Amino acid sequence: MKYYFLLIVSLLTIAGCHKSKTILYSAPGPEKKSDDFEMFVNNKPVFVYEARVSKYPINQIWPGYQRPLDQTEIASFAYFDFDGKVEIEIISKEEINSLDIRPKEYGIIPTITGKSIKIKISKPCQFVVEVNGYHRALHIFANPISILTIDRQNPKVHYFGPGIHEAGVIKLNSDETVFIDGGAIVYGVIVSENARNIKIAGRGILDASKIARHEAPNMISLKHVVNAHVSGIILRDPHIWAVLPGNSDSITIDNLKLIGLWRYNSDGIDIVNSKNVTIKNTFIRAFDDNIAIKGLKGAYDEQHNIIENIKIDNCVLWNDWGRPIELGLETVVDTMKNITFSNCYIPHFTWIAIDIQNGDRGYVKDVHFENIFIEDPILDSITLGTDPMDKKELGKTIELIIKGFDWWTTDTIRGNIINIHFTNIRYNSANPTFINLVGYDSAHMVNNIFIKDYFINGIKITDQHSIRKNGFVKNVFIE
């Protein structure tokens, strides 16, 4: 396998300010710089990239063509590594009339002088700087300094150094590693099938912007893979679902950043008929679902009829249309169980922040949502096809629903939703919200729902007036 690429010297800066160490990466020469922002870390310039994102929440059933560009806009992002404390200065090209730094739960306090924004951080994190509203925002990925060492000469290492790489489909076999270094942009996808013990790591960018909808597999496609570790890199502009662990076991995704997900069906990470999956310290801004756990009919067999032991922790999930947190809608598995979302931040969403849609046979049980912080829904111009949506039905914090037979149903059997726990769910927004619980019939119910420490704008909700439910829901407890 051959790769043709241009090497560019990366910029490595060690800065002593505030007893910190920073690593900054130069961008490839052809890469366009942001028109909206400049950025400095400890007074050293950081390259600010561009990515196409959704402008308004407008969608329709897949029409056979790609989403029109007039529904999108250009946003910015930048990345660096550090240890200790750093000061970040952002120069806005626009006058600053308002400023939000999200997630607000981080408590980052800026100092504004004219068009300059200065902030200080002391630990790795991912956050968004919004000048004059959420449009054309700046996304900042402040990474820890990597301790991973790579032998570039090892034949089992696919190394991509700083520069532009037209890689196409990168096939990853057992015991192999793909390393995309800081300052690199790799145009292509990574595919691994029937493999064990693989790694995908680095600090650079994997970009699928040159790929049409069905021209290649997912940006990171893991099928029948055991023991995979994906970390550190940025994924930009996927053509379909970005990351797909399918029929796989023991997958860890850590400090992944996904941006530029503007196209139809541009999900972030879809866990399909898999088990023992961990996603942590990850940022996803997606048009469609951010993290979805699905059972697909084509993936269902005796070895992959249970989805279990899924852990998602410390993730930032900005959603422009679909669902930040989703189980379903496809649930062609016998059981989905032992699933936990914890310490997750939702700076923006539209429809529903936390969603279980059981559309098939799945017995969904023992699911925990802990310490979930939800901010403002995006409701301006929200449209399905040519029909504006009823805003009163949008911006829900939680929905659990067993669906009837519709577009996405591939099963003849209905499932159940049982033993679902919500602990410390905090919604802060001027937009009203509610919880929606819908069972299917007396044999397929939503049952045993436990809600503890549910806050709306700092007020703890202990009654059931904010909960809507039909006649096939029972044992709902709120305290």
Image (tube, rainbow, N blue to C red):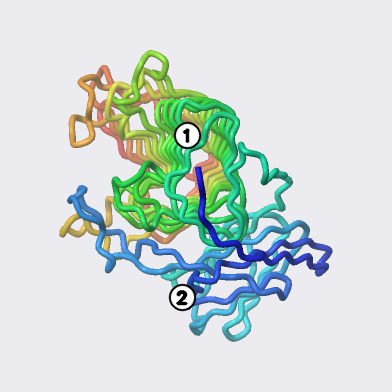
**Residue 173 spot, x, y in % from top left:** 52, 32
Please tell me which residue is depicted at 28% across the width and 21% down the height of the picture.
Answer: 444
Q: Give the side of residue 471 with respect to residue 84, left or right.
A: left
Q: Amino acid at mark 1?
A: Ser
* Mark 1 touches mark 2? (CB < 8 Å): no
Which mark is on residue 132?
A: 2
What residue is shown with label 1?
192
Q: Nearer the viewer, residue 431 or 82?
A: 82
Mark closer to the chain start, 1 or 2: 2
Mark 2 closeness class: few <14, some 14–19, many ≥20 residues within 10 Å? some
- Image depth: mark 1 or mark 2 in front: 1
Please tell me which residue is depicted at 52% across the width and 45% down the height of the picture.
Answer: 372
> Which residue, as the protein is rendered here, is positioned at the far top?
302
In the image, residue 366 sits, relative to residue 51, either above or below, namely above
Please tell me which residue is depicted at 38% across the width and 18% down the height of the picture.
Answer: 305
Distance, label 1 to label 2, CA atoms, is 43 Å
| Mark 1 element type | strand
**Residue 233 spot, x, y in % from top left:** 56, 51
| Mark 2 element type | loop
> Which residue, as the protein is rendered here, is positioned at the far left?
386
Q: Nearer the viewer, residue 54 or 451?
A: 54
**Residue 61 spot, x, y in % from top left:** 20, 48
Q: Nearer the viewer, residue 201 or 157?
A: 157
**Residue 383 spot, x, y in % from top left:** 23, 58
In the image, residue 121 sits, relative to residue 466, either above or below, namely below
Q: Amino acid at mark 2?
A: Asn
Q: Give the side of residue 151 with respect to residue 237, left or right.
A: right
Mark 1 closeness class: few <14, some 14–19, many ≥20 residues within 10 Å? many
How many marks the image carries: the answer is 2
Q: Is residue 465 something that shows in the picture?
A: no
Please tell me which residue is depicted at 55% across the width and 29% down the height of the picture.
Answer: 174
Figure quadrant of residue 465: top left
